[in-house]
Image (cartoon, rainbow, N blue to C red):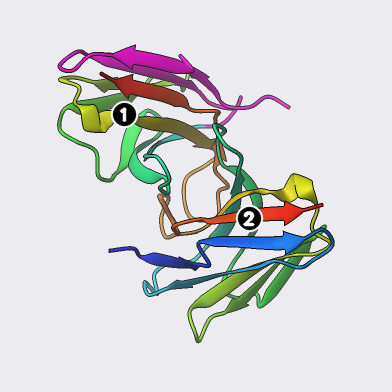
């Protein structure tokens, strides 16, 4: 049973578009929510993370929105570029282990 | 900046053989995590160590064992390999253990069992 549900499974946008990836969780013990970017054959790279006491966090072109009551959070990528084409994973943790969503394969067309 | 180092990067083994994967954390990081990622899947947590002690255990088969050494590097030992063990194995490290300690992943070891 997937503890962190992620959608969509794949996403195609044009350069400059704003892809949005959504995640939902059930376990209220989760208290830290990072996002990772992964290129084929590479390790996941930490992009940005948020705590549940914050509703929004921005770092460069990446923004996380967090809705604690709905147990949902999302990643927005502003001014997306072809180089952003990768698989994005949301994750959640309580304690130390990361629980990942299923991943979203993002393609940004030139 | 120094990153997590994993070796070997690629490994091909036959069924029932053993394999040892090594992980060298970022300098000063004291916590190491192991994850397994099957094709097209999300990484699954296997096991973690903090200050050389096992800190958490996930869905790691009994055929696998791991440890963290005094220099904080870690090794994942896999015995009686099965075809289903073919996957990418990632090591991650953090400075400290707990939710808010950011985990940084290595490049992975691709294990192929034939």
How busy is the neighbourhood of tag 2: few (under 14 within 10 Å), some, or many (20 plus)? many
B98 within the magenta span = no
Residue B70 appears in the picture as rendered: no
Element type at mark 1: loop
**What's the mark number on residue B86?**
1
| Magenta segment | B1-29
Residue A51 at x, y percent in the picture: 59, 67
Quick check: A18 above or below B37? below
Name the residue rendered at 25%, 18% in the picture: B114
Name the residue rendered at 63%, 55% in the picture: A106
Image-quadrant location for residue A15: bottom right
Name the residue rendered at 53%, 67% in the picture: A8
Residue A28 appears in the picture as rendered: yes
Front residue of A94/B10: it is B10
Whole-Å distance between the Cαs marked 2 and 1?
25 Å
Quick check: A58 above or below B30? below
Quarter of the picture holding the N terminus of chain A: bottom left
Could you tell whether A67 is left or right of B12 in the image? right
Image-quadrant location for residue A78: bottom right
Residue B89 at x, y percent in the picture: 40, 31
Residue ID for mark 2: A106
Element type at mark 2: strand
Residue B103 at x, y percent in the picture: 54, 43
**What's the mark number on residue A83?**
none
Quick check: B33 above or below B78? below
Subunit under mark 2: A
């Amino acid at each position: 049973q997937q503890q962190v549900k992620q959608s969509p499974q794949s996403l195609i946008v044009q350069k400059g578009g704003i892809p949005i990836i959504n995640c939902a969780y059930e376990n209220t013990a989760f208290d830290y929510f990072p996002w990772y970017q992964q290129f084929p054959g590479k390790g996941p790279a930490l992009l940005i993370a948020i705590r549940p006491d914050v509703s929004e966090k921005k770092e460069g072109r990446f923004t996380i929105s967090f809705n604690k009551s709905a147990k949902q959070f999302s990643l927005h990528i502003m001014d997306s570029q072809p180089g952003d084409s990768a698989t994005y994973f949301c994750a959640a943790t309580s304690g130390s282990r990361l629980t990942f969503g299923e991943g979203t394969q993002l393609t940004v067309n030139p | 900046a120094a990153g997590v180092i994993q070796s070997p990067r690629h490994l091909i083994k036959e069924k029932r053989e053993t394999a040892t994967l090594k992980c060298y954390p970022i300098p000063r990081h004291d916590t190491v995590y192991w994850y397994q990622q099957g094709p097209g899947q999300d990484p699954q947590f296997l096991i973690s160590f903090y200050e050389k002690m096992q800190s958490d255990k996930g869905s790691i088969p009994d055929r696998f064992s791991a440890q963290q050494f005094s220099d904080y590097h870690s090794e994942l030992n896999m015995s009686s390999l099965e075809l289903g063990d073919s996957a990418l194995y990632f090591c991650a490290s953090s400075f400290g253990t707990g939710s808010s300690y950011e985990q940084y992943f290595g490049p992975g070891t691709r294990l192929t069992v034939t």
